[in-house]
Image: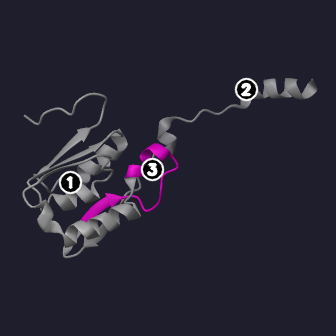
Amino acid sequence: MTQQRQVEDGDDDTVCLGESFFVNRDYELTTFTFGSHSLDLLCLRSASTDFDLTGQLVWPGAVLLNNYLSENAGMLKGCTVIELGSGVGVTGILCSRFCHEVVLTDHNEEVLEASSKNHLTSTLILLHALRQGPIPSPN
């Protein structure tokens, strides 16, 4: 009975942290090379503590995919590509060098902000926040 009362009294010691506590904006300009293509991107070097912000870094799977795409760029020539969950945009930005048009999407505003800084040099990229419902037309 005494332990139960101590636990109930301990509720006053609860600390609530806001969303910003888990946000890491310490982006580093990092150069990625895929075949003869180099990309300079702002990204994190390690994973965030918040599972929802994993798009702030470039994952090993994206590096493997981009190596494959750079070696087989001909299959993308003239195509339109949509990348779902693009994170900082490494794959979409590489595809923009070969494709007619690229659409990058992500659902997290923090990740979209980082992605928008990375794709400023490409006029072929459209950036959309994924929400429930259709993606808006660029027109």
- The residue depicted at 36 percent of the width and 40 percent of the height is 108
Residue 12 disc label? 2
Give the quarter of the figure containing the C terminus: top left
As rendered, which of 13 and 50 lies closer to the eye?
50
Magenta stretch, residue numbers:
40-55
26 relative to 83 in the view: left or right:
right
| Residue 56 drawn at (x, y percent) | 38, 52
**Residue marked by disc 3:** 24
Tell whether label 3 touches label 1 (CB within 8 Å).
Answer: no
Alpha carbon distance from label 2 to label 3: 29 Å
Q: What residue type is labelled 3?
A: Asn
- The tag on residue 119 is 1
Residue 88 position in % (x across, y down): 31, 53
> Does residue 41 belong to the magenta stretch?
yes
Q: Disc 2 marks which amino acid?
A: Asp
Q: Which amino acid does label 1 sit on?
A: His
* In-front residue for pair 134/32: 134
Tell me the CA gap for discs 1 and 3: 20 Å
Is residue 29 something that shows in the picture? no
